[in-house]
Structure formats: C-alpha cells, structure tokens
Image (cartoon, helix red, strand yellow):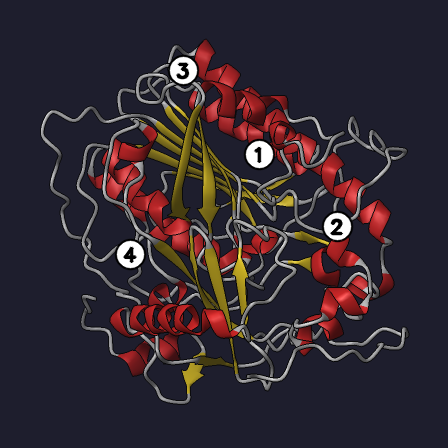
C-alpha cells in the first residue's frame, strides 16, 4: 500500500492512540489528493448515497423476514433497481464502517478502529475527489468520527450535522457552522434539508450523502409511527434460547455476553425489555423508508429520476436475539451483513439481483466511477458498477473482517475472519476460546460450529492462511492500542449463568 510522509509514530500521536509495536499503518493518510484520470466518454452522474444506522440486512419488507414490517420504498428500489444480496462491512461498528465508506479502505488502513478515534490528518474522503471533478457536494446527518465535533469536514460544500449520536427529538444541528434547533423527528429534519438542497438551481452535477441517525438505539419512532406494531406477534430466533444445544461448540464469550449490556438477559443494563426493543426498532425504521420515498419523489419532480444513481445502505447490521445477543461488533451474519440497494434506470435493469460478495469499501470507487473517474490506487475496494449493469466481470472470492476490542464494551473480543460464498472462519485474538467455522449455505443461522470437525481441517488451514495473507498484504498485522476514554458498559446481569461445555475437545 502507498504511504505518504506522515510517520507511523506521528499518526499514532495525532490520533490519540498508541500501539504496542508502534507499527499501526498510517492509513495512507495517505494518499495524496492526486488528480484522478477521467474515463473516456463517461457521463458524470448525479449520485445520492443514503445511509442508515444499525439496519440489518433482512429487515426489509420484500425479504419476508419480519412479516409485519412495511418498507414500500425499499421494496421499490429492489423491484425497480438492484438488490445487492451479499453486502458486508469490514467492521460492524459505526465509525470504522463510515470511515471505510468515505475512504474505500479497511479499518486498519484508515485508522478509525473504534467510535472514539478521530480521523487522522491528511486522510482523503472520496467527496474531495468529486469536488475536483466539478461536483457540488452535500453532507446531511450523522458523521460520528471525532465524537465531540460537528464541524464541517473536507469534501462537502453543504454541511448539516450534529455531535455524536445526536437526538431523535429536540436536538441541535450544525448547518454550515451555524447552530440550529430541530423542530421535528431527526429523520424528517435531515430529509427536509436534503430535499431543499436537491431542488436548488445548479449547473454542476451533484453528490448528496444523506446519513441518518436512525435506527440507532435508544429507538424513538416518528410520532406518526409510534405504536404501529405494539400488538404484533414476534418470532424469536431459534438460537436465542438459553439451552445447552444452542451453546454447544460456541465460544464461551458468546454465552457470557447474553447476561450483559449487549445480551438478551440484561440488555442495556435492564433499560428496555426485548419485545419493546424489537417493535420500537421496526417503528423507527419506517422514518428511513419515508425518507427514501421523499428523495425518490424529489428526483422525479426535478427531472433527474432516470439518470441519478441512488444507493441505500446500512452502516452495519444488528442482532435481535441470535445466539442470545443484541447489537453488532461480532462477525455473525446479522452483524456484518447489511442492506444495499441501488437505483438508476439508465444503468440498472429492474429486478437486478447481485449475488457477488460486496463490501462497504466498494462504495467510494463505485461513486467515483459513476462520476467518470478512475478510482485511486490506494483504495482497497472496487467499483460495483459493472455488477449493477449486469456485466460479466472477474470478482473477489472472499471478504475479510476485523474488529478491535473496546474498553467501553469489553464483552466482544478482537475478531478477524474471512467469508467466502459458502464458508466463514471467525478467529478471536487475545482470549482463550474456540474459533468458529460455519457453512453459511447449509447453516445460515450459524448454529453448527464445524471448527473441530476432522473433515474440515484442510479448509480451516486454507481460510486461516488467506486471512493472514490479507492482513500481511495490507499492513494489518498490528493490534491498535488506544487510550481508554468514556464510560464502561461492563456490568453483569443478576441472572446466574448456566455452565455448559461450550466446545468439544480438539481432535
């Protein structure tokens, strides 16, 4: 990977972190803002990227997972555009994922490895390239990198944001440096700003990044959606039950986490019961679907609905009881897998399904190609435009994952892994526990850990080799050590933990 003049030691100092080996990558902080080569005869398109928070991949009406959930505008995007069926994040956590979207880089490359680490000086966001290409750009919503700041960031001509997680109601926005009180639900407030900006007269192509707070806990639906699902029956995942069968061959930390902040037996330290939590999430999600509909309607109103490329994506997934867990961070499917939809009638045929393995690092190069430019070499991702257009193109055979232990939420260990179209290897660093191997085609709920099966020894060795090859190739072999800041959600619940034998002896 390319490096610039910023030393590793100076990066670590500027980010407020240290590494035991002082070897953490400078993230190509990279990369110089080189002038991108233009693609001959390419038409620069308007692009809209809509991002939500903690929306898991199968909580959309057309997926059929949640039978009562209504998402007509997401359904429309899938029906009239493309559904990227296997979309993943490289790290299932807000700030690292958002930084990967904006840079096209892995977390260990861009350096934002948790929710407390700020963007390092010199890191380039892809909207900065769009400005070079003559685009007018806008950011609306949750930034969440540099937790205490809502200051305008490089790459955006228009800026509407808030500090940290923001508030669903009665919050404060930073509108181009001016503080403005919100007067309605935050999803509606952000969409109002987005639509007003879209309707402005302009001669330049535009890029809009609409970054919602929803559906982050603690969930607050728009008033029009409150209690819509209060009486609907819920279906619980089979792996949620606290049984010996569910925890046979599972890591010990998974069993223990169910009695914590991120577990079903003591969720958020008892602040909310599971059923209310589940229903409020679904009700809060409806404001995101409304936002998508309003953006699509606005495009039609201004005559840009056929040529504009629109994306909808979640920044990471979310567990609702699977393995006794809530939240994300871990590498199970509901956590690392996200919704990703695309719409552009001039490029995408209605009902397109993209089965290839796609990641959040692919967004930046895709948008740049849509703008008529070749993505820079320092990006780890690839453009998915050929996949959206139905073109045959060589593609990756696996995706990789990383998560670094946080003192604030110490229940989940440092995790690395690799997922192919069939198998997933999950490796835990720094804990005395078992790794995991799943056949996700035949065991999509990840209940049968195959790690100790003799017939899979060769497969495990191959996947482990590929994982370490990836880390070595991308300068990811150092574990970042950060100062412990903020509170700790580390209490154990009052429920006694039943002791099970979690995994078989290695053969």
Q: How far apart are marks 1 and 4 (CA)?
A: 30 Å
* Residue 1 vertical position relative to residue 479 in the rendered view, above or below: above
Numbered mark located on residue 305 in the image? 3
> Which image quadrant for residue 399?
bottom left
Residue 237: mark in rendering: 2
Q: Which numbered mark, 4 or 3, is in the foreground of this view?
A: 4
Q: Where is residue 274 in the image (x, y as percent from the top left)?
A: 83, 52
| Earlier-in-chain disc, 2 versus 3 | 2
Q: Is residue 145 visible?
A: no
Looking at the picture, does residue 336 appear above or below residue 209?
below
Per the model, the C-alpha gap separating discs 4 and 3 is 30 Å
Give the mark, 1 or 2, whose residue is nearer the N terminus.
1
Q: Residue at x 13, y 34 (%)?
A: 39
Judge by depth and name the residue closer to the eye, 60 or 353. 353
Query: Under tag 1, what secondary structure?
Result: helix
Q: Which of marks 1 and 2 is in front?
A: 2
Query: CB under 8 Å between callouts 2 and 3?
Result: no
The residue under label 4 is: 380
Q: Distance between the residues labelled 2 and 4?
A: 35 Å
- In-image side of 250 versus 96 (left or right): right
Q: Which mark is residue 167?
A: none
């Amino acid at each position: 990977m390319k490096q610039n003049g910023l030393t590793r030691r100076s990066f670590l100092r500027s980010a407020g972190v240290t590494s035991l080996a002082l070897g953490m990558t400078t993230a190509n902080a990279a990369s110089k803002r080189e002038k991108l080569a233009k693609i001959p005869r390419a038409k620069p398109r308007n692009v809209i990227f809509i991002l939500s928070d903690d929306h898991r991949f199968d909580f959309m009406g057309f997926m059929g997972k949640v039978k009562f959930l209504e998402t007509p505008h997401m359904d429309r995007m899938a029906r009239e555009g493309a559904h990227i069926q296997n979309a993943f994040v490289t790290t299932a956590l807000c700030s690292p994922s958002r930084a990967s979207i904006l840079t096209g880089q892995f977390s260990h490359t861009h350096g934002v490895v948790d929710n407390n680490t700020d963007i390092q000086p010199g890191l380039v966001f892809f909207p900065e390239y769009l400005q070079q290409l003559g685009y007018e750009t806008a950011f609306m919503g949750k930034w969440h990198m540099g937790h205490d700041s809502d200051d305008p960031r490089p790459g955006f001509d228009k800026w509407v944001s808030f500090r940290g997680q923001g508030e669903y109601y009665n919050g404060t926005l930073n509108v181009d440096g001016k503080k403005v009180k919100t007067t309605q639900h935050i999803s509606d407030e952000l969409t109002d700003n987005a639509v007003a900006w879209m309707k402005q007269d302009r001669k330049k192509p535009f890029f809009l990044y609409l970054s919602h707070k929803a559906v982050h806990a603690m969930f607050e639906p728009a008033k029009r959606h409150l209690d819509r699902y209060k009486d609907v029956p819920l279906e619980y995942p089979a792996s949620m039950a606290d049984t010996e069968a569910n925890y046979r061959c599972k890591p010990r930390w998974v069993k223990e986490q169910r009695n914590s902040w991120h577990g079903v037996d003591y969720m958020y330290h008892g602040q909310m019961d599971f059923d209310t939590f589940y229903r409020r999430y679904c009700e809060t999600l409806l404001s995101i679907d409304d936002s998508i509909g309003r953006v699509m309607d606005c495009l039609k109103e201004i005559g840009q609905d056929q040529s504009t490329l629109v994306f909808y994506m979640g920044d990471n997934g979310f567990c609702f009881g699977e393995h006794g867990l809530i939240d994300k961070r871990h590498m199970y499917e509901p956590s690392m897998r996200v919704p990703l939809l695309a719409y552009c009638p001039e490029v995408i045929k209605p009902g397109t399904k993209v089965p290839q393995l796609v990641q959040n690092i692919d967004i930046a190069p895709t948008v740049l190609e849509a703008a008529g430019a070749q993505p820079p070499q320092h990006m780890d991702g690839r453009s998915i435009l050929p996949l959206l257009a139905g073109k045959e193109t060589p593609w990756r055979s696996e995706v990789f994952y990383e998560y670094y232990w946080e003192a604030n939420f110490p229940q989940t260990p440092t995790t690395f892994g690799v997922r192919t179209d069939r198998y997933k290897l999950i490796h835990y660093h720094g804990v005395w526990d078992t790794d995991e191997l799943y056949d996700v085609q035949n065991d999509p709920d990840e209940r049968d850990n195959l790690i100790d099966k003799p017939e899979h020894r060769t497969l495990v060795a191959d996947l482990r080799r590929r994982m370490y090859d990836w880390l070595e190739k991308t300068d990811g072999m150092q574990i970042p050590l950060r100062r412990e800041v903020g509170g700790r959600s580390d209490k154990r619940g009052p429920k006694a933990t039943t002791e099970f034998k979690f995994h078989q002896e290695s053969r």
